[in-house]
Amino acid sequence: MKILDGKALSEQIVESAKEKAAMLEPTLAVIMVGNNPASAAYVKNKHKACEKAGIEFKEYTFDEGVTQQELLDKIEQINNDDSINGVIVQLPLPAQIEVPLVIRAIDPAKDVDGFGAYNLGKTFLSPDFEDLPPATPLGIVKLLDHYDIQVQGKEVVVVGASNIVGKPISTMLLNRNATVTTCHIYTEDLAAHTKRADILIVAVGKPDLITEDMVKDDVVVVDVGINRKDDGKLCGDVDFENVSKKASYISPVPGGVGPMTVAALILNTIRAAERQRQSS
Ligand code: NAD
């Protein structure tokens, strides 16, 4: 069994982004609402990676009671600010905010999380991901590529069908000629699907959802889930200890997809800056 070491690969990607960053001097803006500790930790990791890559990082913090209009006004201001190349709104947002409206307000050219309809649509149409693909799925594709894991003709099973992970990664791997099955909460007999997987990607948010008896020998497992156990430690959606005994490759949590999402964000920010320079 080999570990899909997202942490090491992410460090390499961030390091190799330096050269382009020095030339483009990009700026990433992050909008953060409230003080959810998990969100604060993710923003801190993004800040650190930007510092390492040489990307300027601007953080705009709002308190929990922020109105929808205040957020939309800030996004509008960032959209019109030529000195900012990319913007992300750290999710989750409080209940009074309609997330789809916030995502829709972001200029597609600056949507470095790749959550908006334009960039998701481009992901659907283009196997080359020439725009700004959603960051976590892009990180997963980079991880599979790095370990030379072929997807063409393979049975890929994705568990989880969210707009930010499950659906786009299913489409991206379909575009690379995998045979893709996407499972979700209403899937009957989940194990019947997961057992067929050559490559199993799990993005649900439930510890130990995938157990040893649900996978075949030599499966490649990508665990996207981030859960906090009672002892405070992080874990994924896969019973790592036992599934890793059967897997040919497996990504750990932490140290797998999480850092790759940050690396993908860096790549998207540089791409956004490059494209804005070309079109100006
Ligand atoms: P989501 O809550 O939007 O979607 C969860 C999906 O899982 C849904 O499609 C739902 O139908 C499915 N699901 C729920 N219970 C299921 C079950 N018992 N069997 C099969 N499917 C089931 O979640 P999301 O935003 O895609 O995030 C999923 C997980 O990935 C979370 O733990 C999140 O923290 C993590 N995440 C990690 C990263 C990263 O960078 N590593 C990025 C995004 C999300």
Image: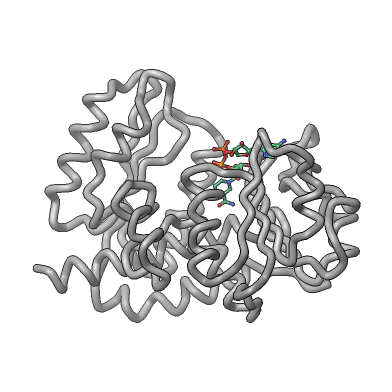
- Outermost residue toward the left in this view: 280
246 or 173, which lies in front?
A: 173
Give the left or right position of residue 19, taking residue 243 as reference: left
Residue 130 vertical position relative to residue 146 in the rendered view, above or below = above
Q: Quadrant of the C terminus?
A: bottom left
Colour scheme in the image?
one colour
Image-based side of 173 in relation to 223, left or right:
left
The image quadrant in which ligand 1 is located: top right
Residue 248: percent from left, percent from top: 81, 71
Q: Is residue 185 above or below residue 140?
A: above
Taking the spot 40% from the left edge, 22% from the top edge, the residue there is 64
| Image quadrant containing the N terminus | bottom right
Picture coordinates of residue 123 (x, y %)? 39, 60
Q: Quadrant of residue 204?
A: top right
User: How many marks are shown on the rendered structure?
Assistant: 0
Give the residue at x 48% y 64%: 263
Q: Residue at x 27, y 64 (%)?
A: 272
Q: Taking 233 as reference, is 225 left or right?
A: left
Side of 229 relative to 112 (left or right): right
Viewer-proximal residue among 25 and 102:
102
Q: 2 or 42: nearer the eye?
A: 2
Percent across and percent down for residue 106 are: 25, 44
Quadrant in which residue 177 is drawn: bottom right
Residue shown at 21% from the left, 36% from the top:
74
Residue 156 x %, y %: 66, 62
